[in-house]
Amino acid sequence: MLQLIPKAPATRPPRFRDLRIRLKLIVLHNGFFLLLTAAVYYSLIPVVEEHVASVQAREFALLGELFLTESRTEPLGVALVEDRRFGSAEDLELAPNARAWLDDHPGRVYWEAEAPDRLYRKDPLTGRYGTLRFPQGFYGGVVTRAKVLLFVALGAVYVLAVLALELFIMPRYVYGPLSATLDADLAVLEGDRAGEIIAPTVIPGDEIGDIMRSRNRTVSGLRDKEAQLERLLSRSEQLAADLQTKNEQLESARRGLASQDRLATIGLLSASVAHELNTPLSVIRGTTDKLLETVETDRERVRLERVRRMSERLSKISEGLLDFTRAPQSETRSAVDLHGLVEEAWSLLRLDERSSGVEFRNRIDPALRVWGDRDRLMQVFVNLIKNGLLALDGGGAICVSSRPEHADGRDWISIDVDDTGPGIPEDVLESLFEAFVSTRLDSQGNGLGLTVADGIVEQHDGKITAQNRPEGGARLTVRLPAAS
């Protein structure tokens, strides 16, 4: 199949108006010099050539007269004469026609066009022939020297004119003002307010100076308009900030009312759940204590100790359900080891069969400490890690990492709980921490775990946020006050 290849557009040579000013001046310099040289040449050289030709003809005629009257023994007295000889026709190698003419006209001078620089004559008394050569190259040299001197003079004038223009006149009156204008425009682009106005001392009084002064007025006017616009924008931003503050206050009040209704509902539900849990938990603790008194092997004792810790944990969760809407007493807070807290939270969740195919990585710095209630913070991380565990559905990884931060004059520690699950739907992301909101539409989730975690974190003066990671999966970030 024949494929047509488009031809590249032909490059057009730059036009004269597109050249830089220095190149334009070079073109004009050379053009002016060529015109001046041609004018002077065709005005002076023809006059010189005509004058030299007339002098040559006059001297040639005079030389012929002298050649007729001279004798062999007396010199001719003309310095330019060359090859002056006398002898027979054979000695002088006379042509037959020249010899015949001289024989017919003795005492006259013979000249022929084939040899314009040579004269012949025959002495009527002795019958001998004579010849002399008149050098015409002398007159041609005079014309050549005149041409050379003319070109040298014109070249010297051209060089001096170019030097004067390029070293003194153009830099001062053209290049300097243009360079100052370009530097000022560059200062405008770079935001240099001090250099964007051209100094009056470098502005000439010609048309270029008029352009420079007009530019200064335009830039000054633009800066005045920008200053007015900035004042208006500042006032608008202040009004917008005030409106945003008022909207945030209204939104906070609305959420506060909705939160109060939600917390009241959850409080009733929590009291009912706690009441239902306390009785079987008491039975489990009592049975476990009796079994611990009777077991003999360490392996069974370890298992019973784990069951007792789980029952105590459930009891504390039951108590938290009753009062998670109330701020805990400050006496219960202390410096909490984050790394150990997260490890213990995962050890509790590892009993869940869904954790068997999940890889858990605890990358929290062991030296970090947060200020808070350990048991309530345990509940937060259990809920967050469990949320990721349910999203993975038996396969994937959960990674918990930390980083120290400083904001609002305080030291904070941000903890990221990342999972490799499908992520959080965008329509649920903004309301994820509200009560009864769940991305899992089965019996495994009821939408209260993240709400309880959010309430506990807020009681610790912290903040919890959620987002989807670019590489996939969800990220829940908790920011808590660092322990001093």
Image (tube, grey):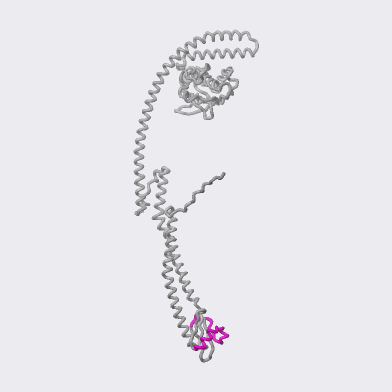
Taking depth in this image into account, of 319 and 469 the one nearest to the observer is 469
Q: Count how many numbered circles sit on residues in the image.
A: 0
The N terminus is located in which quarter? top right
Q: Is residue 231 magenta?
A: no
Q: Position of residue 151 (x, y in %)?
A: 46, 67
Give the side of residue 442 with respect to residue 237, left or right.
right
Which residue in the rendered view is the most extreme toward the right? Answer: 297
Magenta extent: 78-106
Is residue 134 visible in the rendered image? The answer is no
Q: Position of residue 278 (x, y in %)?
A: 52, 10
Taking depth in this image into account, of 468 and 406 the one nearest to the observer is 468
Q: Position of residue 454 (x, y in %)?
A: 47, 20
Which residue in the rendered view is the most extreme toward the front? Answer: 1
- Above or below — where is 373 with respect to 43? above
Give the side of residue 120 with respect to residue 190, left or right.
right
Q: Is residue 100 magenta?
A: yes
Q: Position of residue 39 (x, y in %)?
A: 41, 66
Is residue 356 visible in the rendered image? The answer is yes
Q: Residue at x 35, y 39 (%)?
A: 227
Taking depth in this image into account, of 237 and 305 the one nearest to the observer is 237
Which residue in the rendered view is the most extreme toward the bottom? Answer: 125
- Above or below — where is 2 with respect to 336? below
- Above or below — where is 126 with respect to 13? below
- Above or below — where is 265 with respect to 233? above
